[in-house]
Amino acid sequence: MFLFNRFLHSIIRFVLVSVMTIAMVLGWSAIAHSQLPSLPTAASNDPHQPPKGVTRLGMYEIASVYSPLDRDSLFEIVSPTVFNRSQPPDGSLPVEVRAEEITQRLMRALDRTNKAKQTPLVSIAILNQDSILQLSDDRTTRPLRLVTVTEPDADYYGKSVEELAQDWQKILQAEVERINTLFSHKVLWQRIGQALQISVGLVLGSVVLWLLRRTLIRKQTALQVSHQEQIAAVKEHVVKQSEAETSTTIDTIESSDSQTKTDTIAYGRSQFLDTIQRQFSLKRQLGIYSLLTWLLFWAFILMWYIGIVAIMYRVPYLMRWWTQALARPLALLIIWFFISLVIRIGKTLIDRLTDVWTTHSSVSLSETQRIALRAATVSGALKGLITFVFITLGILRSLNIFNMPTSSILAGGAIIGIAISLGSQSLIKDLVNGCLILMEDQFAVGDVIEIGDKSGLVENLNLRVTQLRNNEGKLITIPNSNITNVSNLTRLWSRVDFSIVVAYENDPKQVLEILKQVCKQLYSEVEWRDRLPESPQVLGIDDLSHTGMSVRVWIKTAPMEQWSVGREFRLRVRQAFEANNIQIDAN
């Protein structure tokens, strides 16, 4: 019941928004009511050019007279050309003003026709030696003058004034009869019933689309859960396989350590690539579901749009607005449909390029993991960029539909953009430096880095800021423009730089031998072998001073493993020195 109420509320909200949108579209162009309209504002932009809807043919200008019922063109009228609409000649009426005046008189005729008991008649009369068309009905004694047939009208059609008046009389009489028929009780209720049937069909269609969408969402959720289970199974399989390969004797490992290490790395990389490929397969399936959900959304909008237009066309009281509803709203739907489609295609192409970039089989496992993290950041930034660009283009194109001057808006936007750029230079520097960090691969999410006196694990990286988590758990946010020198402690591999000062009383060779044994023992153990790409190196005596002999050992480790390996190595050195009575300098 709760879901049905939510769905019902969504339907009501969408219908209200649709009606308001159509009302705004219809209200955008003001309609005069029973008075002589003023000159259109479009003409004031260039008084020497005819306004929209007016065709100039030499000495004549032509405009259409529209039906008061559904705004269909009835016939064209002609007036002498007005070359300067800001200062029209005395006694001259611009053709668009004359056409609008006739249309308004036809609107009054529509009201009379609805109130008359019998069908009004359109007749020809003579007024001041001009042929006019007038409407007579059974409710008023004075006819309503509709159109004056002029010589320019007859000249344009190539007929006499009397012949043209008869033609227009037939057209207007047919229009009056059509209005009278449509507003009769039988036809009116029949059409209202058809509109109600369309409304019921819209509600039922919406319920079907809602159920389909709900089914798709359930399948998406189930697919995501299944994918997570597959990822966990793959990880568990990798761990078990690695333990099986390394659960051999120490002698066997020492005799074939190079081949075992190579096989382990290759196996780990293949398993990781297989995991990534499964993720991409999931993305494709989820992308299909997302596409179907998107198509259902647009099918819902299109269904309601067609239904509303059909209702407006069927109901006589709404017919005068159905052509407006068929024009601008349809153009807006087409624009935003293709904008949304292009954005989806762009994001899909970015995902495909990311797949190719990430699943390169010639790089190491650590690099593959790193590229995967880096690709996620880059693809997110590119998706945001194309979304912003195409939505901006869609807004500008939508403003053009409403005849708004986008050139001035762009000019004003450019000025505002310059002002904002001058006031936010640091933000621009952050974005530029963030792009360079990603392009040069200075560091990525998961690396441990040092930036000045700040250090920690890179937890978040975008074009504007870098966020580090230090040893105390503090989240440190650093603007990318402040990053000039950075030290990456986990790029490809890491190292433990072990140095200890022993007393002169100790035998140097014995000290070095003990360190070599500790290194060999650590490298041979299964628990630590996978963290050491190669055997530790005992470099020898690094310095002689008055405090004693400084001995140095380098231990190359996998990324992020230098701290655990270093702690374990120091413990073993301390135990080995104590067992062999090696004196550490106490100064």
Image (spheres, helix red, strand yellow):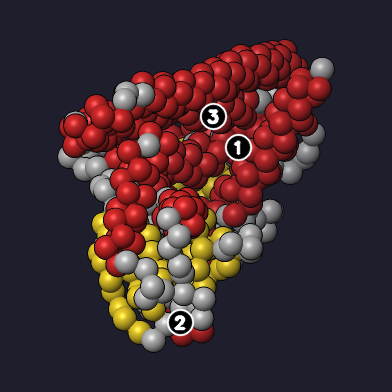
Camera-nearest label, 3 or 2:
2
Label 1 neighbourhood size at 10 Å, few (<14), some (14-19), many (20+)? some
Disc 2 marks which residue? Answer: 425
Name the side, left or right, on which 511 lies relative to 414.
left
User: How far from the left and from the top, in percent, is residue 269?
Assistant: 28, 34
Q: Nearer the viewer, residue 92 or 398?
A: 398
Vertical comparison of 445 with 227: above or below:
below
Which is nearer the N-term, disc 3 or disc 2? Answer: 3
Residue in view at x 46 percent, y 69 percent = 584
Name the element at disc 2.
helix
Which residue, given by chain and number where applicable, does mark 1 sit on? 320
Q: State whether residue 271 appears in this view.
A: no
Look at label 2 and name its amino acid: Gln
| Residue designated by label 3 | 297
User: Residue 355 location, x and y as percent?
Assistant: 29, 37
Q: Amino acid at mark 1?
A: Arg
Mark 3 or 1, nearer chain start: 3
Q: Nearer the viewer, residue 266 or 285?
A: 266
**SS class, disc 3:** helix
Q: For the residue marked with disc 3, what is the amino acid?
A: Phe
| Distance Cα–Cα, label 1 vs label 2 | 54 Å
- The reply to whether residue 5 is in sight is yes
Label 3: how many Cα within 10 Å (few below 14, some 14–19, many 20+): some
Q: Nearer the viewer, residue 293 or 140?
A: 293
Q: Secondary structure at mark 1?
A: helix
Asked whether disc 3 touches disc 1, contact meaning CB atoms under 8 Å apart, the reply is no
Residue 573: horizontal and vertical position, in percent? Answer: 43, 56
